[in-house]
Image (cartoon, rainbow, N blue to C red):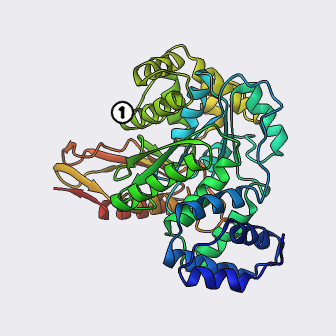
């Protein structure tokens, strides 16, 4: 590769000229190896933020960041099915991956999920799984790959070896005001997902008060970009746009959400919104993967995976294989303890439950101890919120709106005040 001249690459983008494949590859390599300094990388990120990227540039950036680290290679294995994953742009109470992974595996997919941690107001799948005693979210990729082959699904966190260029660039974007750029978000998400060596990816792009892209038109633009770039990069990709103006499912908080996943898989309780989004995403995945000829067949296969108990068996096998307790669905009461102060928040008046600011619900969870403001913060897996009343329901004065699971009465009172301020009953 010729000598890297960061200034020339930055100036090109600053002046609105499209970057070549070679410019972009030099940027990704230079970022990891040090020829592109952090101020230079931040300057280029700002130039991209301001001037955007053509589709071919975003594809090249995605591939260059993917190839800056390890990419799972499945070619030497006798695979039982297509390699499929689902990813979400992040929400509050979003536990879809934990039920959908075993459901897809039960339908014949191989599902190597490399998931994220929660940061800010959104929760992270990896944190939820880490609340299961013993579950290991961090392991060498060959070991992860073998577990996925044995069980059909595995979920771990991002390792230092996956897309290191994205890891560096994301941190710089975060401190330089360059996060909300569609080409940068698209290439960031896809570089990590495509490192899994996927045939098929379904993306859940969220909008609404609890989403990272709150405006629906912006979320739609992101969904379109991810679909277009994913397909151009050779992975069949479909994006669904879903509503984050309400917490997803009936609980939010780590132990509470794992219990909700168990209830979902056993069939004891399936929150209708959670069920609809999970089924919609899984149906798209099965049809795109060629495992179902149409949506109706895919739906039947998914019902069979749930009704036969096969998805539940795979979930239990996954938890045990990654170091958690055996038969978690039977033993979770012992392994997933509750918080010490659990009490419902009662409605101060009668009326209709009109709206809830889900961003503020996420921040309340964070204050309760279920989230972190910096990656070093320790989280309390027992705290959270459960039994949310559905949006637009009629409520009586004194009726429970949500149950708050807090570590102390003071924390409960603080959460109550913040939630009441952000729920509207008319
Ligand atoms: N998630 C990512 O992985 N990257 C982004 O840029 C935004 C959300």
Q: Position of residue 259 (x, y in %)?
A: 54, 35
Residue at (61, 38) in percent of width and height:
336
Give the crowd class for mark 1: few <14, some 14-19, many >=20 residues within 10 Å. Answer: few
Residue 112 in the figure: left or right of residue 364: right
> In this figure, which residue is indicated by the disc labeled 1?
272
Residue 392 in the figure: left or right of residue 182: left
For the residue pair 139 and 161, the one nearer the viewer reads as 161
Q: Position of residue 301 (x, y in %)?
A: 50, 18
In the rendered image, the quadrant that contains the N terminus is bottom right
Q: Position of residue 116 (x, y in %)?
A: 62, 52
Residue 39 shows up from this direction? no
Residue at (34, 58) in percent of width and height:
216
Relative height, residue 49 to residue 130 (above, below): below
Residue 160 shows up from this direction? yes
Relative height, residue 28 to residue 345 (above, below): below
Considering the numbered disc 1 on the image, is that residue within a helix, a strand or a loop? helix
């Amino acid at each position: 590769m010729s000598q890297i001249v960061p200034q020339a690459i930055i100036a090109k983008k600053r002046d609105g000229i499209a970057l070549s494949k070679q410019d972009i590859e030099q940027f990704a390599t230079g970022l990891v190896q040090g020829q592109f300094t952090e101020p230079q990388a931040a300057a280029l990120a700002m130039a991209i933020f301001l001037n955007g990227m053509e589709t071919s540039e975003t594809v090249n950036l995605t591939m260059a960041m993917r190839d800056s680290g390890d990419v799972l290679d499945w070619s030497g294995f006798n695979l039982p099915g297509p390699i499929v994953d689902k990813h979400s742009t992040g929400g509050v109470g979003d536990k879809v991956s934990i039920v959908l992974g075993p459901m897809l595996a039960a339908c014949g997919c191989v599902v190597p999920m490399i998931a994220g941690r929660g940061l800010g107001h959104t929760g992270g799948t990896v944190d939820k799984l880490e609340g299961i005693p013993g579950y290991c979210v961090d392991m060498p990729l060959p070991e992860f790959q073998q577990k996925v082959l044995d069980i059909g699904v595995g979920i771990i966190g991002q390792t230092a070896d996956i897309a290191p260029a994205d890891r560096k660039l994301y941190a710089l974007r975060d401190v330089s005001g360059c996060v909300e750029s569609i080409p940068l978000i698209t290439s960031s998400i896809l570089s990590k997902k495509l490192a899994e060596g996927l045939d098929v990816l379904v993306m859940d792009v969220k909008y609404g008060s609890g989403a990272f892209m709150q405006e629906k038109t912006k979320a739609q633009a992101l969904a379109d970009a991810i679909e277009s770039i994913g397909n151009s990069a050779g992975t069949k990709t479909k994006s669904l746009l879903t509503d984050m103006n309400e917490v997803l499912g009936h609980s939010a908080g780590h132990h509470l959400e794992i219990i909700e996943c168990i209830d979902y898989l056993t069939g004891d309780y399936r929150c209708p919104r959670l069920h609809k989004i999970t089924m919609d995403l899984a149906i798209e995945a099965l049809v795109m993967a060629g495992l179902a000829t149409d949506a109706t067949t895919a739906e039947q296969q998914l019902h069979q995976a749930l009704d036969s108990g096969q998805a539940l068996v795979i979930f239990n096998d996954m938890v045990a294989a990654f170091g958690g307790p055996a038969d978690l669905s039977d033993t979770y009461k012992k392994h997933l303890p509750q918080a010490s102060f659990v009490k419902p928040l009662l409605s101060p008046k009668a009326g209709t439950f009109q709206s809830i600011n889900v961003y503020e619900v996420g921040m309340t969870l964070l204050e309760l101890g279920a989230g972190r403001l910096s990656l070093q913060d320790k989280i309390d897996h027992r705290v959270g919120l459960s039994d949310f009343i559905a949006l637009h329901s009629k409520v009586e004065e004194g009726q429970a709106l949500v149950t708050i699971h807090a570590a102390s009465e003071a924390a409960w009172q603080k959460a109550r005040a913040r939630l009441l301020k952000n729920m509207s009953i008319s």
